[in-house]
Image (tube, helix red, strand yellow):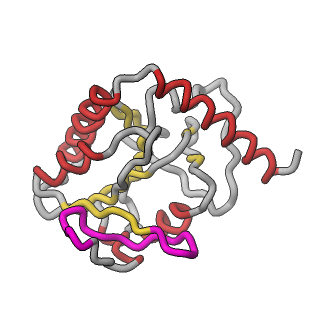
């Protein structure tokens, strides 16, 4: 099986697993757990008023990010949310801006932390997203040393003995995952 087909099949299996996993979860409790974990991470890496976090507005079935974003904003942290452009690159807007005024693609370079979506992450930090490549374009724009956490449901971080996710040369390794159960830093990142 060629690499592209293998990635398509892997995404299909991960999406199926996600649908099954989500069906048995308490989304309200997950939202609270995620918000608590995000606030703990922010404090642990020294983020406070004036800091910037790239986040996103979750879609149905994804781990809920609304309370994460609200909790960070309540602590004076500026949360930027993506605007997907026709070429699947991402512009950004301030979560507090009711007009969602675009700030430009380079707004990603202002981030002090990135909370990225994904379907799964392996122990080496390989992230599998939805397949559009949006974050493959964004992650190289962040400043050196800015950590990336992928927001997942519990159980979506692969175990050491699972088959690793396919990694392409353009894939940027992530630093960890955040779930309703807490944060897990990878490869000594935490």
Magenta span of residues = 84-99
- Residue 174 in percent (x, y) is at 49, 49
Q: Is residue 131 left or right of residue 34?
A: right
Residue 98 falls within the magenta-colored stretch: yes
Figure check: 143 above or below 23: below
Looking at the picture, tell me which residue is in the foreground, 187 or 8.
8
Looking at the picture, tell me which residue is in the foreground, 13 or 190.
13
- Residue 42 in percent (x, y) is at 22, 47
Figure check: 77 above or below 151: below
Q: Quadrant of the C terminus?
A: top left
Residue 39, picture quadrant: top left
Figure check: 111 above or below 55: below
Q: Can the viewer see residue 104 in this picture?
A: yes
Residue 136 falls within the magenta-colored stretch: no
Q: Is residue 29 left or right of residue 143?
A: left
Q: Which residue in the rendered view is the most extreme toward the right?
A: 1
Q: Quadrant of the N terminus?
A: top right
Figure check: 147 above or below 15: below
Magenta-highlighted stretch: main secondary structure? loop
Looking at the picture, tell me which residue is in the foreground, 162 or 66.
66
Q: Can the viewer see residue 188 in this picture?
A: no
Q: Is residue 39 left or right of residue 179?
A: left
What residue is drawn where x is 56% and y is 35%? 123
């Amino acid at each position: 099986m060629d690499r592209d087909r293998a990635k398509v099949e892997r995404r299909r299996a991960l999406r199926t697993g996600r649908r099954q996993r989500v069906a048995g979860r308490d989304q309200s409790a997950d939202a609270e757990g995620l918000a608590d974990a995000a606030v703990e991470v922010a404090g642990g890496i020294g983020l406070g008023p004036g800091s910037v976090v790239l986040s996103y507005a979750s879609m149905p079935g994804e781990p809920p990010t609304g309370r994460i974003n609200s909790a960070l904003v309540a602590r004076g942290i500026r949360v930027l949310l993506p605007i997907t452009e026709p070429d699947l690159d991402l512009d950004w807007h301030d979560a507090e801006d009711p007009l969602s005024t675009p700030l430009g693609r380079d707004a990603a370079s202002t981030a002090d932390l990135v909370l990225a979506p994904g379907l799964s992450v392996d122990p080496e930090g390989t992230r599998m997203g939805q397949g559009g490549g949006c974050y493959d374009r964004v992650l190289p724009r962040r400043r050196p040393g800015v950590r990336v956490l992928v927001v997942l449901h519990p159980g979506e971080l692969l175990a050491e003995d699972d088959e690793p996710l396919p990694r392409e040369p353009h894939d940027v390794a992530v630093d960890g995952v955040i779930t309703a159960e807490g944060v897990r830093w990878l490869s000594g990142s935490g």
